Image: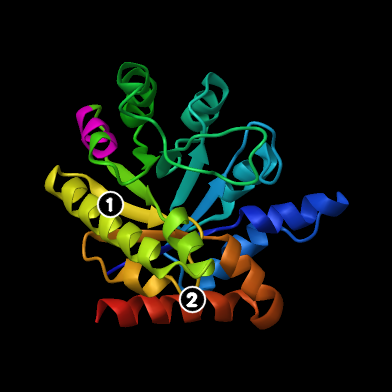
């Protein structure tokens, strides 16, 4: 079964725009649970632009589903993750000036440092995931340093689709397919995410090596019109249809 992780970051983005308690990301996470999500993802950024430390505290206390904590490879974030010991920790690249995560982690260029960084997280019982591109060098490096999971960045594939560039979209999809096969052959569990929509999820969900898709911004945007439960259920329907 292909799992669906729902990212609730942008519920917090809306809340923070007005500095009120509403909408509550924890309430969104509970709605996602009831709608059939398999996990909840939250990115605690260094600048706390959406999810806050208090949100993580509350999510850990309230959730029945596994929490996937996305974070940069900093000492502060490692301390937070070791205190909470979430089900999964996904290490992502992070720049203060970016609107959203722009690419994958450079594991191949930072093998030794990342190996040291993820070891305590793994020893504490969290599944360590690395958010990377589909390049073979990055995938092989992730396997060498002992990550349990790689999450392949689907942003370029989705952007090419939105921009009406089918040749580039199809080439990116083929590269993602090859990357997923390589990662699985090395013993890594393979996830995917970033920018996925109703229109783009099918070809990604059809790649058999993918075990989980993490989707957030589109689901929160679509929930404005049809509700979060219906958005999640429709995404699940399309994922399942692609698999069958």
Are circles 1 and 2 on residues that touch, CB within 8 Å?
A: no
Q: Residue furthest left?
A: 185
The question of residue 217 being in magenta is answered with no
Q: Which residue is mark 2?
A: 198
Work out whether mark 1 precedes mark 2 in sequence or the reverse, and give the earlier one: 1
Picture coordinates of residue 66 (x, y %)? 43, 53
Q: CA distance from mark 1 to mark 2?
A: 21 Å
Q: Quadrant of the N terminus?
A: bottom left
Residue displayed at 65% across by 69% down: 221
Q: Quick check: 39 above or below 107? A: below
- Label 2 Cα crowd, 10 Å radius (few <14 / some 14-19 / many 20+): some
Describe residue 170's horizontal placement relative to residue 105 as left or right.
left
Q: Which mark is residue 190?
A: 1
- Label 1 Cα crowd, 10 Å radius (few <14 / some 14-19 / many 20+): many
Query: Is residue 20 something one can see in this rendering?
Result: no
Question: Foreground mark, 1 or 2?
Answer: 2
Residue displayed at 38% across by 61% down: 168
User: In this picture, which residue range is highlighted in magenta?
Assistant: 138-144
Q: Quick check: 160 above or below 98? A: below
């Amino acid at each position: 079964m292909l799992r669906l992780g729902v990212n609730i970051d942008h519920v917090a983005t809306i809340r923070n725009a007005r500095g009120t308690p509403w909408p509550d990301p924890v309430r969104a996470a509970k709605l996602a649970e009831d709608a059939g999500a398999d996990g909840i993802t939250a990115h605690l950024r260094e600048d706390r632009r959406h999810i806050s430390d208090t949100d993580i505290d509350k999510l850990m206390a309230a959730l029945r589903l596994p929490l996937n904590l996305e974070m940069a490879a900093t000492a502060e974030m490692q301390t937070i993750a070791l205190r909470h010991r979430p089900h999964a920790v996904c290490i992502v690249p992070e720049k203060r000036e970016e609107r959203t995560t722009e690419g994958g982690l450079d594991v191949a260029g930072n093998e030794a440092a990342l190996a040291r960084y993820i070891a305590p997280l793994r020893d504490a019982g969290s599944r360590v995931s690395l958010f990377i591109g589909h390049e073979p060098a990055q995938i092989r490096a992730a396997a060498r340093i002992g990550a349990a999971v790689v999450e392949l960045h689907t942003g370029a594939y989705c952007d090419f689709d939105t921009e009406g560039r089918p040749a580039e979209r199809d080439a990116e999809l083929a590269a993602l397919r090859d990357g997923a096969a390589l990662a699985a052959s090395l013993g890594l569990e393979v996830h995917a995410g970033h920018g996925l929509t109703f229109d783009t999820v099918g070809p990604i969900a059809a790649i058999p090596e993918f075990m989980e898709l993490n989707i957030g911004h589109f689901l929160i945007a679509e929930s404005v019109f049809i509700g979060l439960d219906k958005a999640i259920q429709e995404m699940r329907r399309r994922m399942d249809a692609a698999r069958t």
